[in-house]
Image: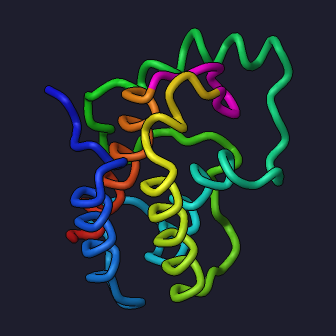
């Protein structure tokens, strides 16, 4: 089963509509993050692509990530509830809902505008070179998981 194509305008617009349905009072069905932290958590995926603010894994760790984690992140199988997350995705400090929401929407729009050709065979921060389908799955699956978590 192929996941919806986040690089298409219709799918990215649908995700943005779901994000716009969140409010600062939105409550999760599972997990410990409040809605602002969840948005900040989702922003990390895009920070790893567009910002140079996260330490890159050294060769051995990158090898382990590719061997043991990559397939879970880029395949089409949905994430389970309350799964483990990488340290850079742990958001412990308070975040401003509107700021995180605006950042996430900007990242989604930028990604859609760059398109799948830009991402095909592009190196990821942690997993090496990914195909456009792997990039799509990683972006879409993570967003969909957390938007479902918050019932939007």
Quarter of the figure that contains the N terminus: top left
Q: What is the image's colouring?
A: rainbow
Task: Say left or right for 104 vs 129.
Answer: left
Q: Residue placed at 57% from the left, 49% from the top? A: 45
Q: How many marks?
A: 0
Task: Say left or right for 65 vs 141.
Answer: right
Position of residue 83 relative to residue 100, above or below, is above
- Residue furthest to the left in view is 1
Quarter of the figure that contains the C terminus: bottom left
Location of residue 3 in the rendering, given as x and y in whole percent from the top left corner: 22, 37
Location of residue 138 in the rendering, given as x and y in whole percent from the top left corner: 43, 37
Q: Nearer the viewer, residue 72 or 45?
A: 45
| Region in magenta | 123-131
Is 124 in the magenta? yes
Location of residue 35 in the rendering, given as x and y in whole percent from the top left corner: 44, 76
Location of residue 33 in the rendering, given as x and y in whole percent from the top left corner: 48, 67
Position of residue 57 relative to residue 48, above or below, is above
| Residue 112, quarter of picture | bottom left
């Amino acid at each position: 089963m192929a996941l919806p194509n986040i690089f298409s305008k219709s799918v990215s617009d649908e995700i943005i509509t779901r994000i716009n349905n969140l409010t600062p009072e939105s409550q999760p069905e599972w997990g410990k993050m409040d809605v602002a932290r969840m948005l900040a958590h989702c922003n990390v995926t895009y920070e790893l692509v567009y910002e140079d603010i996260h330490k890159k894994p050294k060769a051995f760790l990158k090898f382990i990530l590719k061997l043991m984690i990559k397939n879970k992140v880029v395949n089409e199988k949905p994430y389970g509830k309350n799964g483990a997350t990488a340290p850079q995705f742990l958001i412990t400090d308070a975040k401003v809902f509107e700021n995180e929401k605006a950042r996430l929407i900007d990242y989604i729009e930028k990604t859609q505008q760059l398109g799948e050709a830009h991402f095909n065979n592009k190196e990821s921060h942690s997993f090496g070179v990914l195909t456009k389908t792997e990039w799509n799955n990683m972006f879409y699956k993570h967003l969909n998981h957390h938007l479902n978590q918050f019932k939007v």
